[in-house]
Image (cartoon, rainbow, N blue to C red):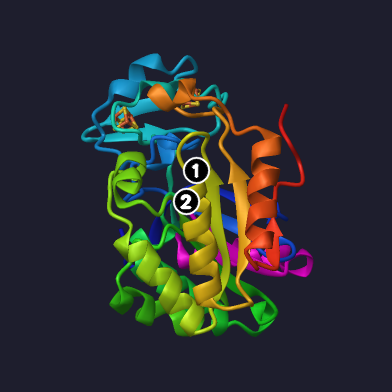
Amino acid sequence: MSDGVAAVSKFLTWSVVDGPGNRFVLFLQGCNYRCVTCHNPHTIGVCSDCGTCVAVCPSGALSRTSRKVVHDPGVCIACDSCLAACPTRANPMVRRMTVEDVLVLLRRNAPFLNGLTVSGGEATLQLDFLIDLFTAIRAAPELAHLTLFIDSNGHLPVDGWRRVLALTDGVMLDIKAFDADRHRRLTGVDNDLSLASARLLATVGKLHELRFLLIPGETDRPEEIAALAALARELGPQTRLRLNAFQQHGVRGPAAGWPKMPRDGLEAAAVALRAAGIAEVAVPSVWLP
Ligand code: SF4
Ligand code: SF4
Protein backbone atom coordinates (compact mmCIF):
# COMPACT_ATOMS: atom_id res chain seq x y z
CA MET A 1 0.00 0.00 0.00
CA SER A 2 1.33 3.47 -0.82
CA ASP A 3 0.08 6.58 -2.64
CA GLY A 4 0.12 8.32 0.70
CA VAL A 5 -1.92 5.59 2.44
CA ALA A 6 -0.67 3.09 5.02
CA ALA A 7 -2.04 -0.08 6.59
CA VAL A 8 -1.89 0.76 10.30
CA SER A 9 -2.43 -1.86 12.97
CA LYS A 10 -2.41 0.59 15.86
CA PHE A 11 -1.24 4.00 16.99
CA LEU A 12 -0.34 5.41 20.38
CA THR A 13 -0.65 9.14 20.98
CA TRP A 14 1.88 8.96 23.80
CA SER A 15 4.68 6.53 24.63
CA VAL A 16 7.91 6.80 26.63
CA VAL A 17 9.37 3.40 25.59
CA ASP A 18 9.60 3.86 21.81
CA GLY A 19 12.51 6.27 21.56
CA PRO A 20 13.64 9.43 23.35
CA GLY A 21 11.06 11.52 25.20
CA ASN A 22 7.31 11.48 24.66
CA ARG A 23 6.48 9.96 21.31
CA PHE A 24 3.54 9.35 19.02
CA VAL A 25 3.94 5.78 17.73
CA LEU A 26 2.52 4.47 14.49
CA PHE A 27 2.53 0.68 14.13
CA LEU A 28 2.38 -0.35 10.48
CA GLN A 29 0.87 -3.71 9.50
CA GLY A 30 2.96 -6.44 7.88
CA CYS A 31 6.39 -7.90 8.53
CA ASN A 32 9.09 -9.59 6.46
CA TYR A 33 10.26 -11.67 9.44
CA ARG A 34 8.40 -14.66 10.89
CA CYS A 35 9.77 -14.54 14.42
CA VAL A 36 8.75 -17.56 16.48
CA THR A 37 8.94 -15.36 19.58
CA CYS A 38 6.80 -12.51 18.21
CA HIS A 39 4.47 -11.19 20.90
CA ASN A 40 2.30 -9.34 18.35
CA PRO A 41 1.93 -12.08 15.70
CA HIS A 42 -1.26 -10.51 14.32
CA THR A 43 0.88 -7.65 12.96
CA ILE A 44 2.80 -9.98 10.62
CA GLY A 45 0.32 -10.86 7.91
CA VAL A 46 -1.59 -8.92 5.32
CA CYS A 47 -5.35 -9.59 5.22
CA SER A 48 -6.57 -11.55 2.20
CA ASP A 49 -10.26 -10.89 2.99
CA CYS A 50 -10.81 -14.65 3.32
CA GLY A 51 -13.66 -14.06 5.79
CA THR A 52 -12.69 -16.67 8.38
CA CYS A 53 -12.75 -14.13 11.20
CA VAL A 54 -16.26 -12.84 10.41
CA ALA A 55 -17.92 -15.94 11.88
CA VAL A 56 -16.10 -15.74 15.24
CA CYS A 57 -16.84 -12.09 15.96
CA PRO A 58 -19.31 -12.06 18.89
CA SER A 59 -20.48 -8.49 18.38
CA GLY A 60 -21.15 -8.36 14.65
CA ALA A 61 -18.32 -5.89 14.17
CA LEU A 62 -17.08 -7.79 11.11
CA SER A 63 -19.01 -8.18 7.89
CA ARG A 64 -18.43 -8.97 4.25
CA THR A 65 -19.23 -6.46 1.55
CA SER A 66 -18.63 -8.00 -1.86
CA ARG A 67 -14.95 -8.97 -1.70
CA LYS A 68 -13.89 -7.07 1.41
CA VAL A 69 -14.07 -7.77 5.13
CA VAL A 70 -15.15 -4.61 6.91
CA HIS A 71 -14.62 -3.73 10.58
CA ASP A 72 -17.03 -1.47 12.48
CA PRO A 73 -15.11 0.00 15.45
CA GLY A 74 -18.37 1.38 16.84
CA VAL A 75 -19.56 -2.07 17.95
CA CYS A 76 -16.21 -3.85 18.39
CA ILE A 77 -15.68 -5.02 21.97
CA ALA A 78 -11.91 -5.56 21.49
CA CYS A 79 -12.10 -9.24 22.45
CA ASP A 80 -9.40 -10.19 19.89
CA SER A 81 -11.28 -13.40 18.86
CA CYS A 82 -10.67 -12.43 15.23
CA LEU A 83 -6.90 -12.27 15.76
CA ALA A 84 -6.84 -15.78 17.19
CA ALA A 85 -8.92 -17.11 14.28
CA CYS A 86 -6.88 -15.64 11.44
CA PRO A 87 -4.85 -18.30 9.62
CA THR A 88 -2.40 -15.78 8.16
CA ARG A 89 -1.61 -13.78 11.32
CA ALA A 90 -3.37 -10.73 9.92
CA ASN A 91 -5.83 -8.35 11.55
CA PRO A 92 -9.26 -7.34 10.17
CA MET A 93 -9.18 -4.20 12.34
CA VAL A 94 -6.27 -2.68 10.41
CA ARG A 95 -7.15 0.83 9.31
CA ARG A 96 -6.10 2.70 6.19
CA MET A 97 -4.56 6.03 7.17
CA THR A 98 -3.43 8.81 4.89
CA VAL A 99 -0.49 11.09 5.56
CA GLU A 100 -3.01 13.84 6.34
CA ASP A 101 -4.79 11.56 8.86
CA VAL A 102 -1.51 11.21 10.75
CA LEU A 103 -0.71 14.92 10.49
CA VAL A 104 -4.07 15.78 12.06
CA LEU A 105 -3.32 13.52 15.02
CA LEU A 106 0.22 14.88 15.35
CA ARG A 107 -0.99 18.50 15.31
CA ARG A 108 -3.57 17.70 17.98
CA ASN A 109 -0.94 16.14 20.26
CA ALA A 110 2.10 18.20 19.23
CA PRO A 111 2.39 20.27 22.47
CA PHE A 112 2.92 17.07 24.45
CA LEU A 113 5.28 15.31 22.03
CA ASN A 114 9.01 15.19 21.38
CA GLY A 115 8.68 13.06 18.31
CA LEU A 116 7.16 10.37 16.13
CA THR A 117 8.32 6.75 15.92
CA VAL A 118 7.14 4.54 13.08
CA SER A 119 7.21 0.90 14.12
CA GLY A 120 5.52 -2.33 13.05
CA GLY A 121 5.26 -5.02 11.97
CA GLU A 122 8.20 -3.79 9.96
CA ALA A 123 8.03 -0.06 9.30
CA THR A 124 10.27 -0.10 6.22
CA LEU A 125 7.94 -2.46 4.33
CA GLN A 126 5.80 0.65 3.68
CA LEU A 127 8.78 2.78 2.69
CA ASP A 128 6.94 5.03 0.23
CA PHE A 129 4.43 5.99 2.92
CA LEU A 130 7.23 6.53 5.42
CA ILE A 131 8.98 8.91 3.03
CA ASP A 132 5.73 10.75 2.21
CA LEU A 133 4.90 11.11 5.90
CA PHE A 134 8.34 12.30 6.99
CA THR A 135 8.52 14.72 4.04
CA ALA A 136 5.14 16.21 5.01
CA ILE A 137 6.16 16.58 8.66
CA ARG A 138 9.45 18.27 7.70
CA ALA A 139 7.41 20.76 5.65
CA ALA A 140 5.05 21.59 8.55
CA PRO A 141 6.42 24.45 10.74
CA GLU A 142 4.06 23.59 13.62
CA LEU A 143 5.66 20.09 13.78
CA ALA A 144 9.27 21.26 13.44
CA HIS A 145 10.11 20.26 17.02
CA LEU A 146 9.32 16.58 16.41
CA THR A 147 12.17 14.12 15.92
CA LEU A 148 11.44 11.31 13.47
CA PHE A 149 12.50 7.78 14.37
CA ILE A 150 12.12 4.35 12.78
CA ASP A 151 11.92 1.08 14.71
CA SER A 152 13.16 -1.64 12.34
CA ASN A 153 14.49 -5.17 12.02
CA GLY A 154 16.95 -3.79 9.47
CA HIS A 155 15.85 -6.05 6.63
CA LEU A 156 16.20 -3.22 4.14
CA PRO A 157 18.94 -2.92 1.51
CA VAL A 158 21.26 0.09 1.43
CA ASP A 159 19.35 1.69 -1.46
CA GLY A 160 16.19 1.67 0.61
CA TRP A 161 17.89 3.32 3.59
CA ARG A 162 19.37 5.97 1.29
CA ARG A 163 15.85 7.06 0.32
CA VAL A 164 14.76 7.76 3.88
CA LEU A 165 17.83 8.51 6.01
CA ALA A 166 18.06 12.23 5.22
CA LEU A 167 14.54 12.61 6.65
CA THR A 168 15.21 10.46 9.73
CA ASP A 169 16.73 11.45 13.05
CA GLY A 170 17.41 7.94 14.31
CA VAL A 171 16.75 4.24 13.95
CA MET A 172 16.19 1.70 16.69
CA LEU A 173 17.44 -1.53 15.18
CA ASP A 174 16.68 -5.09 16.28
CA ILE A 175 19.38 -7.70 15.90
CA LYS A 176 17.68 -11.06 16.49
CA ALA A 177 20.73 -13.37 16.55
CA PHE A 178 24.31 -13.53 15.27
CA ASP A 179 24.66 -17.21 14.40
CA ALA A 180 23.29 -17.48 10.86
CA ASP A 181 21.44 -20.78 11.43
CA ARG A 182 19.93 -19.58 14.69
CA HIS A 183 18.75 -16.36 13.04
CA ARG A 184 17.05 -18.31 10.25
CA ARG A 185 15.44 -20.67 12.75
CA LEU A 186 14.16 -17.81 14.94
CA THR A 187 13.04 -15.42 12.18
CA GLY A 188 12.75 -17.36 8.93
CA VAL A 189 15.28 -15.13 7.15
CA ASP A 190 19.03 -14.43 7.00
CA ASN A 191 20.69 -11.79 9.18
CA ASP A 192 23.02 -10.36 6.54
CA LEU A 193 20.80 -7.34 5.78
CA SER A 194 20.21 -6.41 9.42
CA LEU A 195 23.94 -6.58 10.22
CA ALA A 196 24.73 -4.48 7.13
CA SER A 197 22.04 -2.00 8.22
CA ALA A 198 23.63 -1.67 11.67
CA ARG A 199 26.96 -0.80 10.09
CA LEU A 200 25.43 1.65 7.60
CA LEU A 201 23.32 3.42 10.22
CA ALA A 202 26.27 3.74 12.61
CA THR A 203 28.48 5.11 9.83
CA VAL A 204 26.02 7.89 8.99
CA GLY A 205 25.25 8.65 12.66
CA LYS A 206 21.62 7.49 12.55
CA LEU A 207 21.83 4.39 14.76
CA HIS A 208 20.01 5.47 17.90
CA GLU A 209 20.02 2.07 19.59
CA LEU A 210 20.67 -1.62 18.98
CA ARG A 211 18.04 -3.88 20.52
CA PHE A 212 18.64 -7.53 21.37
CA LEU A 213 16.08 -10.01 22.71
CA LEU A 214 17.55 -12.52 25.15
CA ILE A 215 15.95 -15.95 24.74
CA PRO A 216 17.05 -18.67 27.20
CA GLY A 217 19.21 -21.30 25.53
CA GLU A 218 19.26 -19.35 22.27
CA THR A 219 20.41 -15.74 22.23
CA ASP A 220 21.67 -15.67 25.84
CA ARG A 221 24.46 -18.08 24.93
CA PRO A 222 28.02 -16.77 25.55
CA GLU A 223 28.89 -16.79 21.85
CA GLU A 224 25.86 -14.61 21.05
CA ILE A 225 26.74 -12.12 23.81
CA ALA A 226 30.36 -12.05 22.64
CA ALA A 227 29.23 -11.37 19.06
CA LEU A 228 26.93 -8.58 20.26
CA ALA A 229 29.81 -7.00 22.18
CA ALA A 230 32.09 -7.31 19.13
CA LEU A 231 29.54 -5.60 16.87
CA ALA A 232 28.93 -2.81 19.38
CA ARG A 233 32.68 -2.19 19.69
CA GLU A 234 33.04 -2.19 15.90
CA LEU A 235 30.22 0.37 15.57
CA GLY A 236 31.94 2.76 17.97
CA PRO A 237 31.92 3.93 21.59
CA GLN A 238 28.67 5.86 21.15
CA THR A 239 26.73 2.63 20.52
CA ARG A 240 23.76 2.14 22.82
CA LEU A 241 22.47 -1.36 23.54
CA ARG A 242 19.05 -2.26 24.89
CA LEU A 243 18.53 -5.78 26.18
CA ASN A 244 15.01 -7.18 26.25
CA ALA A 245 13.85 -10.38 27.92
CA PHE A 246 11.76 -13.05 26.20
CA GLN A 247 8.26 -13.42 27.69
CA GLN A 248 5.56 -15.82 26.47
CA HIS A 249 2.85 -13.13 26.41
CA GLY A 250 1.10 -13.12 23.03
CA VAL A 251 3.43 -15.74 21.51
CA ARG A 252 1.85 -18.45 19.37
CA GLY A 253 3.25 -21.87 18.46
CA PRO A 254 5.99 -23.90 20.17
CA ALA A 255 7.79 -20.83 21.52
CA ALA A 256 4.75 -20.13 23.73
CA GLY A 257 6.05 -23.03 25.85
CA TRP A 258 9.64 -21.82 26.04
CA PRO A 259 10.85 -20.55 29.43
CA LYS A 260 10.88 -16.82 29.88
CA MET A 261 14.21 -15.06 30.32
CA PRO A 262 15.10 -14.91 34.03
CA ARG A 263 16.09 -11.55 35.46
CA ASP A 264 19.44 -12.79 36.79
CA GLY A 265 20.33 -14.09 33.29
CA LEU A 266 19.53 -10.73 31.76
CA GLU A 267 21.58 -8.89 34.37
CA ALA A 268 24.49 -11.31 33.84
CA ALA A 269 24.42 -10.52 30.10
CA ALA A 270 24.44 -6.78 30.87
CA VAL A 271 27.43 -7.25 33.21
CA ALA A 272 29.30 -9.26 30.54
CA LEU A 273 28.66 -6.57 27.92
CA ARG A 274 29.83 -3.78 30.21
CA ALA A 275 32.93 -5.83 31.08
CA ALA A 276 33.55 -6.15 27.33
CA GLY A 277 33.76 -2.38 27.11
CA ILE A 278 30.20 -1.40 26.10
CA ALA A 279 29.38 1.71 28.13
CA GLU A 280 25.64 2.05 27.47
CA VAL A 281 23.67 -1.12 28.18
CA ALA A 282 20.02 -0.60 29.12
CA VAL A 283 17.76 -3.27 30.63
CA PRO A 284 13.97 -3.19 31.19
CA SER A 285 13.03 -0.86 34.04
CA VAL A 286 9.79 -2.80 34.66
CA TRP A 287 9.94 -6.57 35.19
CA LEU A 288 6.83 -8.66 34.64
CA PRO A 289 6.43 -11.37 37.31
S1 SF4 B 1 -8.05 -10.92 9.09
FE1 SF4 B 1 -7.37 -13.01 8.60
S2 SF4 B 1 -9.21 -14.31 8.88
FE2 SF4 B 1 -9.92 -12.16 8.73
S3 SF4 B 1 -10.42 -11.86 6.57
FE3 SF4 B 1 -8.29 -11.16 6.86
S4 SF4 B 1 -7.00 -12.95 6.37
FE4 SF4 B 1 -9.12 -13.72 6.69
S1 SF4 C 1 -11.89 -7.74 18.46
FE1 SF4 C 1 -12.38 -8.77 16.51
S2 SF4 C 1 -13.72 -10.50 17.11
FE2 SF4 C 1 -13.67 -9.11 18.87
S3 SF4 C 1 -15.47 -7.75 18.60
FE3 SF4 C 1 -13.71 -6.70 17.61
S4 SF4 C 1 -13.76 -7.31 15.46
FE4 SF4 C 1 -15.08 -8.76 16.61
Name the quarter where the N terminus is drawn.
Answer: bottom left
| Circle 1/circle 2 CB separation < 8 Å | yes
Q: Is residue 134 visible?
A: yes
**Residue 104 sits above or below residue 52 on the image:** below
Q: Amino acid at mark 1?
A: Arg
Check disc 2 and report the residue beneath it.
Answer: 224
Mark 2 residue element: helix
Q: Is 110 within the magenta?
A: yes
Q: Position of residue 130 (x, y in %)?
A: 43, 68
Q: Is 80 within the magenta?
A: no
- Give the distance between the C-alpha atoms of the residues marked 1 and 2, in whole angstroms: 5 Å
**Residue 206 sits above or below residue 156 on the image:** below
Mark 2 crowd level (few <14, some 14–19, many ≥20, 10 Å Cα): some
* Residue at figure coordinates x 47%, y 76% from the top left: 201
Helix, strand or loop for the magenta stretch, by majority = helix
Residue 198 lies in quadrant:
bottom left
In what quadrant does ligand 1 lie? top left
Mark 1 residue element: loop
Residue 14 lies in quadrant:
bottom right
**Residue 141 sits above or below residue 197 on the image:** below
Mark 1 crowd level (few <14, some 14–19, many ≥20, 10 Å Cα): few
* Residue at figure coordinates x 51%, y 38% from the top left: 215
Q: Position of residue 206 (x, y in %)?
A: 53, 78
Check disc 1 and report the residue beneath it.
Answer: 221
Q: Position of residue 170 (x, y in %)?
A: 56, 73
Residue range highlighted in magenta: 98-120
* Residue at figure coordinates x 53%, y 43% from the top left: 220
Q: Position of residue 256 (x, y in %)?
A: 47, 23
Q: Is residue 172 visible?
A: no
